């Protein structure tokens, strides 16, 4: 049986196209984690339309919060704080979550905690392994963000590198579109690559110099385009099929995964870390997880691979990181605003 609960936080996440809420006890015990995805709404555009996303959040937010509370077996009066993503993200989407969180905080006289979405992904390792040894490397790879962090304590991290152009998930989405695969691209490429040869096509790995921990994925996307449609050649008869499609998908996925793994190796050589954790939608990719587990250098670290449900945008990561602010008494005012941009580079600390 579970022991007594010290504090209980509701986390709300609406930064992009998932409407999510979760209840987390003591910063790591996930009592509920409810997510509604808008993939079907945005599939026709192969990307998230902000106005469509914010309207969907408006329709879904209260039922999602109610379901999270019901699954956790608690009421709003039984919460100790309300946490919500307030940066970064699409402004209209963020405002829906903020409005719901502020209303709950005001109605039930509970403190409000503003959470940085990217830092919440960094913190996911502590949800999966509360005893994760420090310092640790954290990779956040998603459709909107790809960055590498040095984590020195819960809620404290230093950004070591970030993408200079496309995020890893964005590159997978664009590659899938070129191959005629469905949206979202990451899962489609992974499925198509299952029976493919990852070395069939020689696609580039952009490493940006021997010392760089930054990422770049625009080159591999362009290389795939020219593999499909060589410059000066007649237009192709159609989209790739069969084994050629499988080999192209596998080679493209491998090129993206290679860069992520190589940058993690480079960071592990430079910093005396004891653990490695991953977060963001791309962290669900099975090939990436396999490569990390098989890598002789990285598997010497405590490898923390959160459950896939904790890697995509979700409320549990918001409530989990908010526990740091709760313990420190760092609460936000009810005029907390939405901010589209992430925190700047350098050291980051969870504060509203």
Image (cartoon, rainbow, N blue to C red):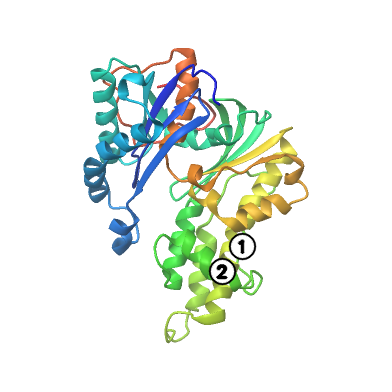
Query: Residue 63: where, in percent of width, then height?
Result: 26, 39
Residue at 29% across / 64% down in the picture? 44
What is the secondary structure assignment of the residue under circle 1? helix
Residue to which mark 2 is pinned: 193
Picture quadrant where residue 204 is located: bottom right
Query: Residue 294: where, in percent of width, then height?
Result: 73, 53
Residue to which mark 1 is pinned: 254
Residue 101 in view of the camera = yes
Query: Residue 111: where, in percent of width, then height?
Result: 35, 16
Query: Residue 144: where, in percent of width, then height?
Result: 43, 47
Q: Are marks 2 and 1 in contact (CB under 8 Å)?
A: yes
Is residue 258 rendered to the left or right of residue 114?
right
- Specify the quadrant that holds the C terminus: top left
Is residue 50 rendered to the left or right of residue 142?
left
Please give the label number shown on residue 53.
none
Residue at 21% across / 43% down in the picture? 59
Residue 206 in view of the camera = no
Is residue 302 rendered to the left or right of residue 234?
right
Marks 2, 1: nearer the viewer: 2
């Amino acid at each position: 049986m579970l022991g007594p609960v010290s504090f209980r936080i509701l986390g709300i996440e609406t930064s992009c196209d998932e409407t999510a809420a979760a209840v987390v006890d003591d910063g790591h015990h996930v009592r509920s984690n409810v997510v509604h995805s808008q993939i079907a709404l945005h599939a026709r555009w192969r990307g998230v339309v902000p106005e469509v996303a914010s309207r969907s959040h408006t329709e879904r937010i209260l039922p999602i919060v109610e379901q999270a509370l019901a699954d956790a077996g608690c009421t709003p009066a039984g919460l100790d704080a309300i946490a919500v993503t307030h940066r970064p993200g699409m402004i209209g989407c963020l405002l829906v979550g903020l409005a719901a969180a502020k209303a709950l905080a005001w109605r039930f006289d509970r403190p409000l905690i503003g959470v940085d979405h990217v830092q919440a992904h960094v913190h996911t390792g502590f949800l999966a392994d509360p005893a994760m040894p420090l310092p640790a490397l954290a990779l956040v790879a998603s459709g909107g963000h790809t960055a590498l962090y040095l984590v020195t304590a819960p809620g404290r991290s230093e950004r070591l590198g970030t993408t200079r152009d496309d995020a890893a998930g964005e590159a997978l989405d664009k590659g899938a579109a070129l191959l005629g695969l469905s949206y979202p691209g990451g899962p489609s490429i992974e499925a198509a690559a299952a029976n493919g040869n990852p070395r069939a096509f020689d696609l580039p790995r952009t490493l940006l110099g021997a010392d760089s921990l930054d990422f770049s994925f625009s080159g591999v996307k362009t290389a795939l385009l020219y593999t499909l449609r060589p410059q000066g050649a007649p237009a192709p008869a159609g989209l790739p099929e069969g084994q050629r499609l499988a080999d192209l998908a596998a080679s493209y996925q491998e090129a993206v995964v290679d860069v992520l793994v190589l940058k993690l190796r480079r960071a592990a050589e430079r910093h005396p870390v004891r653990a490695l954790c991953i977060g963001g939608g791309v962290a669900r990719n099975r090939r990436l997880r396999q490569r990390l587990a098989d890598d002789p250098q990285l598997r010497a670290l405590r490898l923390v691979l959160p459950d896939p449900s904790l890697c995509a945008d979700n409320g549990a990561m918001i409530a989990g990181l908010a526990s740091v602010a709760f313990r420190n008494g760092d609460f936000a005012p009810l005029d907390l605003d939405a901010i589209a941009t992430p925190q700047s580079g350098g050291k980051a600390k969870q504060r509203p």
